[in-house]
Image: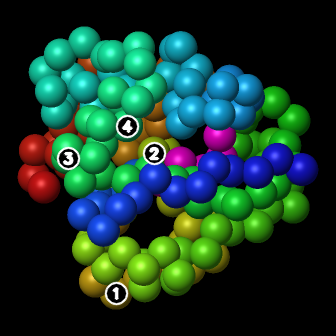
Amino acid sequence: MIYSFPPFVNKETKILILGTMPGIASLEKQQYYAHPRNHFWKILFTILEKTVVSEIYEERIQLLTRNKIGIWDVLQNCERKGSLDIHIKNQQANDFEKLFEEYPAIKTIVFNGKESHRYFIKSFGKIKGITYHVMPSTSPANTMSFEKKLKSWSVVFDNL
């Protein structure tokens, strides 16, 4: 059984980015999106700061804080061989009702990939008052080019 990280949110968080479950590299480093070929941080730094990605995890988290963005995973725990979502079994979702109750400023969810969206909808359906955006996964398993991922993610953040 593997477990997700606690949410990174605060009372100022307006946008919540949701993955499905941390991959092996993230679990080993205990950091969100730690795989060196994952485009998550490069996309956010490019869109929000127009600068190169900081290698310092605390600076990555500060980027989120400055932009009122939180991150978490849809699943609290599961069984999975490797890092691919297709291998997930016996999953349990995180407690989003409690999260939204505690952090009512969250009005937008950005799903990092179709699988996170699928698991969320399966467990919670559509929550009133929350806008959903399903983005291409930033995972290296998604072979879409960085430029195409960036263009898709930019549309969402340009409109927020």
Instruction: Work out whether mark 4 precedes mark 1 in sequence or the reverse, and give the earlier one.
Output: 4
What secondary structure characterizes most of the magenta part?
loop
Q: Nearer the viewer, residue 156 or 51?
A: 51
| Quadrant housing residue 133 | bottom left
Q: Which mark is residue 61?
A: 4
Give the label, 1 or 3, closer to the camera: 3
Which residue is depicted at the point 26% across and 74% down?
105
Give the label, 3 or 2, closer to the camera: 3
Can residue 133 be seen here? The reply is no
Seen in the image, is 153 located left or right of residue 155? right
Instruction: Work out whether mark 4 precedes mark 2 in sequence or the reverse, and give the earlier one.
Output: 4
Instruction: Work out whether mark 3 precedes mark 2 in sequence or the reverse, and give the earlier one.
Output: 3
The residue that mark 1 highlights is 128
| Farthest left residue in view | 159
Label 4 amino acid? Ile
Q: From the viewer's perspective, is residue 62 above or below residue 68?
A: above
Q: How many marks?
A: 4
Instruction: Kindly report the distance in space between the C-alpha atoms of the residues bearing marks 1 and 3.
Output: 23 Å
Label 1 amino acid? Lys
Which residue is depicted at the point 52% across and 14% down?
37
Instruction: Work out whether mark 3 precedes mark 4 in sequence or the reverse, and give the earlier one.
Output: 4
Q: Nearer the viewer, residue 67 or 93?
A: 67
The residue that mark 2 highlights is 112
Instruction: Kindly report the distance in space between the C-alpha atoms of the residues bearing marks 3 and 2.
Output: 17 Å
Q: Residues within 10 Å of mark 4 (few under 14, many from 20)?
A: some
Can residue 136 be seen here? The reply is yes
Instruction: Kindly report the distance in space between the C-alpha atoms of the residues bearing marks 3 and 4.
Output: 10 Å
Which residue is depicted at the point 25% across and 12% down?
52
Q: Which stretch is magenta?
A: 18-22
